[in-house]
Amino acid sequence: MNEAAIISKVSGRAVPVRGNDIDTDRIIPARFLRCVVFDGLGPHSFEDDRLGLKAKGQTHAFDDARYQGASILFVNKNFGCGSSREHAPQALQRWGIKAIVGESFAEIFFGNCVSLGIPCLTADEAALGRLMAAAEKEPQAQWSVDIEAGKVTGPVSESAALPSGPRSQFLSGRWNSLNELLANLAGVENVAAALPYVAGW
């Protein structure tokens, strides 16, 4: 068990982004995929959505000063659909997001989040409605996403689920595949030494 990698709870303020079927191109537009590293992606999260709303005199939640520094994202159905780009969860993580609670997630986006240590919990439509309304009413409120208990707690409290496999990975710290390899380096080297296409060149 890698105790340093255990993620059992995420705490902080929450930012709601309403809308179903928000795809990865909306999360991070394709023109930002040319980067070699992901470090500069955070400020470009939802860039085109934010510019579009700004042109209409409206403000996207990621531009709203009340939500700056938030670490928990509330979303609706099928969040992260579209292309499989890893840049989408990378951008959200670099903006500061450490956990997402939504009605549902696209499968590849969900898997990419697990590999980055971002738990994506699901709750039903009514529960998400209450969570979002509370976050909009009290933007400075502190929230807690408890992976072990399956609870999101703040001004309101709602049940939220994580599939048993990823839940176990977060609670054991085994979500980080690189840490797993490094913790078992001797075994990796033994296997590599036995592979002709690795050791026989």
Image (spheres, rainbow, N blue to C red):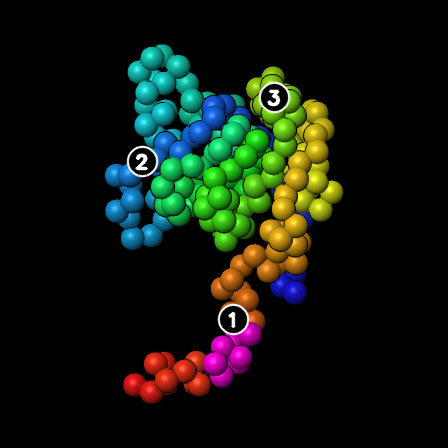
Q: Is residue 168 left or right of residue 183?
A: right
Q: Mark 3: which amino acid?
A: Gly
Mark drawn on residue 9 = none
**Element under disc 2:** loop
Q: Which mark is residue 29?
A: 2
**What element does badge 1 sit on?**
helix
Q: Which residues are magenta?
A: 184-191
Check residue 188 for magenta coloring. yes
User: 92 left or right of 196?
Assistant: right
Q: Which residue is mark 1?
A: 182
Callout 2 amino acid: Pro
Q: Is tag 2's residue or tag 3's residue first in the polypeptide sequence?
A: 2
Q: Which residue is mark 3?
A: 129
Of the 4 image quadrants, the one containing the C terminus is bottom left
Instruction: Residue at 53% x, 65% y: name it.
Output: 179
Q: Is residue 179 above or below residue 15?
A: below
Q: Are marks 1 and 2 in contact (CB under 8 Å)?
A: no
Does residue 58 appear left or right of residue 141 in this picture? Answer: left
> Residue 101 magenta-drawn?
no
Q: Residue furthest top?
A: 57
**Mark 1 or mark 2, earlier in chain:** 2
